[in-house]
Image (spheres, helix red, strand yellow):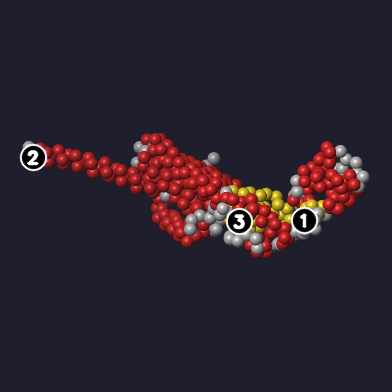
Amino acid sequence: MEIFKSTNFDFLGKKWAFIALSLVLTAAGLISLAIKGGPKYGIDFNGGAQMTVKFSHRPSAEEIRSAIRKRIPGEIEVQEITNSQEVIVSTEVKDEKTLNLERQQMVDALNDAFGQKNGKLDINNIGAADLADRLRSPLQNASVAVSEDQLQALAKAILTFRDTAPRSGLILNLDHLASVPGVTPQVLQVLKQQCYPSRLHYSKVEVVGPKIGADLRHQAVLVVLYALAAMLVYIAFRFEWVYGVAAVIAVFHDTIITIGLFSIFNKAIDLTVLAALLTLVGYSMNDTIVVFDRIRENIKLQRRGSFSELVNASINQTLSRTVLTSGLTLLTALSLYLFGGQVLNGFSFALVIGIIIGTYSSIFIASPILIFGKNFADQRKKTSRTATPATRGAAKVTK
């Protein structure tokens, strides 16, 4: 399928405008990184405690931050999830030994501010084993005959009811448990005596040590560098070294701009973002190889005109494929960014930015670099050829 047929756009004639845009984006990103002391890393690379908390009525981010600061000093990040009562709370951990303590302090601080303490069991933040242990004696005292297996099954059924939609971890009223199989009026009465539904539910808790985070960060840098080096070797082997250098510089350009935009927009880089960056390295390289492959085919056909004209013609010939592939991929990434939620926000943002930057870099960055490198190499060959006869002539005169 071809959207454009027999096009003759002067892409390389517009190269300086896009090169200037790249320089501006690169400079802005590097300045932002310098001011902020490097990229903003997520918990995966920086180490710390992070938890997702669902509220019955979500307080403001500042209220949550203030509540946690009473127990934990330092930077506290609160991300509100759009169209949800959930927030993601993160704190930095400087000492490996304080990880579990800090996690518990976060829970205690939120419970103090937004929960309630009445000596009862919080049914929104317990496991099945704890619930069974709490109900065992009270059920016996209430003359409710249940075997141990029935008690365990009852506890699991109650928590399954709690964790399924639309509750998704948050029971607002214990009377709702009346619809759970096995919850008779007598059992419900015991539940009300022993348990209460709090206003918040901790659905996800992650803890990463600073040393592990630093190791992951180091490995992430090596992975990207190894990928670029492997692609340089592959393209140099498949084409010529100048093609490989042009392609790797373009991909490095894409990566630097994407990381710079993450810094400008104050977005954290975590493992999902790393996965997106590696995906974009492969995507941008593939797009560049398609153009380079057409250039090589046109060279074999010995088309007339300069090398610049041949490159421009090759870009026009692959334009339909570029628009179809990049356009459809961009629509998918944009949908993921708009509707994927907070968890996939960084990943989808990297994809959207990377696809846009990667597509234009294949045309306006890699191709001009290739032309410059090719002309430079040809000029050196001509210089060496003209220098050789002159050297021989000088030798004869000496004789």
The span from disc 2 to disc 1 (Cα, nearest Å) is 101 Å
Looking at the image, residue 152 sits to the left or right of residue 311; the answer is right
Q: Which of labels 2 and 1 is toward the front?
A: 1
Location of residue 220 in the rendering, given as x and y in whole percent from the top left corner:
50, 45
Q: Residues within 10 Å of mark 2 (few under 14, many from 20)?
A: few
Ranked by sequence position, the earlier of labels 3 and 1 is 3
Please tell me which residue is depicted at 78% across the width and 48% down the height of the picture.
162
Residue beneath disc 3: 91
Quadrant (top left, top right, bottom left, bottom right) of the N terminus = top right
Give the numbered dot on residue 111: none
Foreground tag (2 vs 3): 3
Quarter of the image where one finds residue 240 = top left
Give me the disc on residue 198: 1
- Point out the residue furthest to the left here: 399
Up/down of 286 relative to 94, above or below:
above
Question: Disc 3 on helix, strand or loop?
Answer: strand
| Residue located 44% across and 39% down the image | 230
